Amino acid sequence: MNKASVKMWLHEPLKSEVSVALERLAKTEDVYHIAVMPDVHLAKDVCIGTVVATQSRLYPQAVGNDIGCGMTAIGFQSHADVFKNETAAARLLNGLGKLVPTNRHPKLTMVDSLPDALQQAPLSTPKLEKLKRRDARVQFATLGRGNHFLEFQASEQNELWLMVHSGSRAIGQSITNHHLQQAATANTGLKFLNAESEAGQAYLQDIEWAYAYADLSRQAIMEAAIVLMEEFFEVSAELSSMIACHHNHVKRETHFGETYWVHRKGAVSAANGEVGIIPGSMGTASFHVEGRGCDPALRSSSHGAGRTMSRYEARKTFTIKQLRQQMTGVWFDHRLENQLREEMPLAYKDIHTVMRAQRELVRIVRKLRPVLSYKGT
């Protein structure tokens, strides 16, 4: 059996455990091409920052649990100095805490029902339908934990932008877990579904729903932030400026004259001219980009900076003093300082180095610096 071709865009040598994981992936049946992004790092089963092309098989572990996780951004009719003092920033952070919970909505802010598009599109089993009516509803328009965030940012022209990073929440993981139970086992231990089988078609049906859920949830989060900006600062959003992308998906695409199932786990589609969003870590720069359509990279780019250490290692290694130093000039909730150590910039790769490593994958349209960061823990 032939190994898959593997192309890499790196700024430093791979860690040994990442190399082992990629070697295993390259030997997996029906995997023809792999592109490795500069933010690649170890994750369960398949590394984050990898793009995998197969011909007939779907590998849910090459998509990940947080199906449809991605970014949405919008500009405002304002300069970024609207948060000119701590009182203004604290007011907004408190408002976000009420309207955009981390985990689930209380009854006061919970939606009565999911948007019509999500209600009308069925999931593949009664069990998943039950979770849709229950868990998916109470978690709709919630941020999530870990590296998910809502951040106000300033462009190099001091224009105010908002960026939201969130995904399909618990329902995405439930969809993945359900289909992994139906999956067969490949030669390397990864689980797969034949795309044309009944099980494969059910997975595709459910992940399309999860993409829509994640997209609409991010839009609802953004709308809540827009309401607060209008109420507190009399600042309106420029609706025509909205851009979005997601970085955990599988799609049917043509590459090298062949049609493949292209799995992106922590990677963004970057076809020529395609708009994308690449955030840095908390407290560092983010970028709006356009794809260059690099074929060897399966027309993809990184989805962020990429971790250099686990959250557990970061909590053991870094102090609150270091967090404050790295977050100088950025408003955030100091009550969460202890927990936020796991997300500080030192726990991630340098985003500027990552961007240099993928110059042939994307062109930078806009560079942004953080002004106010709202995160769950």
Image (cartoon, rainbow, N blue to C red):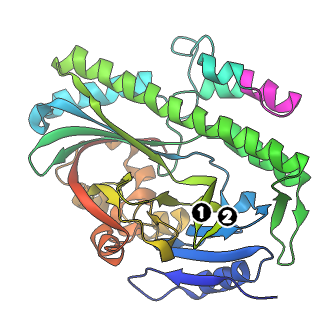
Q: The disc labelled 1 sits on which kind of residue? A: Thr
Q: Please tell me whether mark 1 sits on a helix, a strand or a loop.
A: strand
Membership of 258 in magenta stretch: no
Q: Are marks 1 and 2 in contact (CB under 8 Å)?
A: yes
Name the quadrant of the N terminus: bottom right
| Quadrant in the rendering for residue 73 | top left
Q: Residues within 10 Å of mark 2 (few under 14, many from 20)?
A: many
Q: Position of residue 124 (x, y in %)?
A: 83, 34
Q: Residue at x 68, y 19 (%)?
A: 119
Q: Residue 74 versus residue 136: which sits nearer the camera?
A: 74
Q: Residue at x 59, y 88 (%)?
A: 16
Quick check: 70 above or below 51? Answer: above
Q: Position of residue 92 (x, y in %)?
A: 27, 27
Q: Position of residue 168 (x, y in %)?
A: 60, 39
The residue that label 1 is drawn on is 254
Q: How many marks?
A: 2
Quick check: 19 above or below 352? Answer: below
The residue that label 2 is drawn on is 260
| Quadrant in the rendering for residue 281 | bottom left
For the record, the magenta segment spans 122-133
Horizontal arrangement in the rendering, residue 32 relative to residue 150 (left or right)? right
| N-terminal label among 1 and 2 | 1
